[in-house]
Amino acid sequence: MAKEFRRDVFQAIADPTRRAILSMVAVQAMTPNAMAEHFNTSRQAVSKHIKILTECQLISQESSGREIYYHFNAKQMKDVDQWLEQFKKLWEDRFNQLDEVLNNLKPNNYEN
């Protein structure tokens, strides 16, 4: 039976530890040991998070001598951005409507 991989980006970024790892490697490539130093957990637990992020292609690995460095894959985050874009438009429309209502209320309050 083939192993099933987690490839859902949204599932991956739902976890706060994985979001923290993404934030760190977005600034600079890091080794698993360097990442693990930032968490109050085992190196193995961090490795499981790295595996999920790698399976989702949110990070990629590159060997340098005996070390493996993980890099942020901004291209994969575009899927998240595109999905959020639909909500940004909705929010902007609602804020614009609220601005319009508030602007219409102001003159009436000052006339009395």
Image: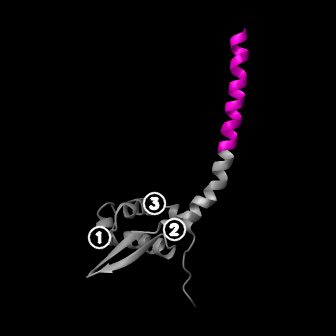
Which residue: 51% across, 68% down? 75
- Residue 108 in the image: state x and y as whole percent: 73, 16
As measured in the structure, the alpha-carbon distance from the residue carrying label 1 to the one carrying label 3 is 17 Å
Q: Are marks 2 and 1 in contact (CB under 8 Å)?
A: no
- Residue at horizontal 51%, vertical 62%? 13
Instruction: Tell me if residue 26 is in the magenta stretch.
Output: no
Q: Position of residue 54 (x, y in %)?
A: 46, 74
Q: Is residue 110 magenta?
A: yes
Left or right, 3 with respect to 67, comes to right
Q: Is residue 78 above or below residue 106?
A: below
- Give the labeled residue for mark 2: 75
Which is nearer the N-term, disc 1 or disc 3?
3
Residue range (magenta): 92-112
Name the image quarter holding the C terminus: top right
Tell me the quarter of the image containing the N terminus: bottom right
Q: CA distance from mark 2 to mark 3?
A: 16 Å
Q: Nearer the viewer, mark 2 or mark 1?
A: 2
Residue type, numbered disc 3 = Arg
At a point 69% along the width and 25% down the height, the residue shown is 103
Question: Which quadrant holds residue 3?
Answer: bottom right
What's under tag 2, amino acid-wise? Lys
Crowding around mark 2 (Cα neighbors within 10 Å: few <14, some 14 to 19, many 20+) is few
Instruction: Kindly identify which numbered label has been placed on residue 33.
Output: 1
* Residue with the mark numbered 3: 19
Does the image show residue 45?
no
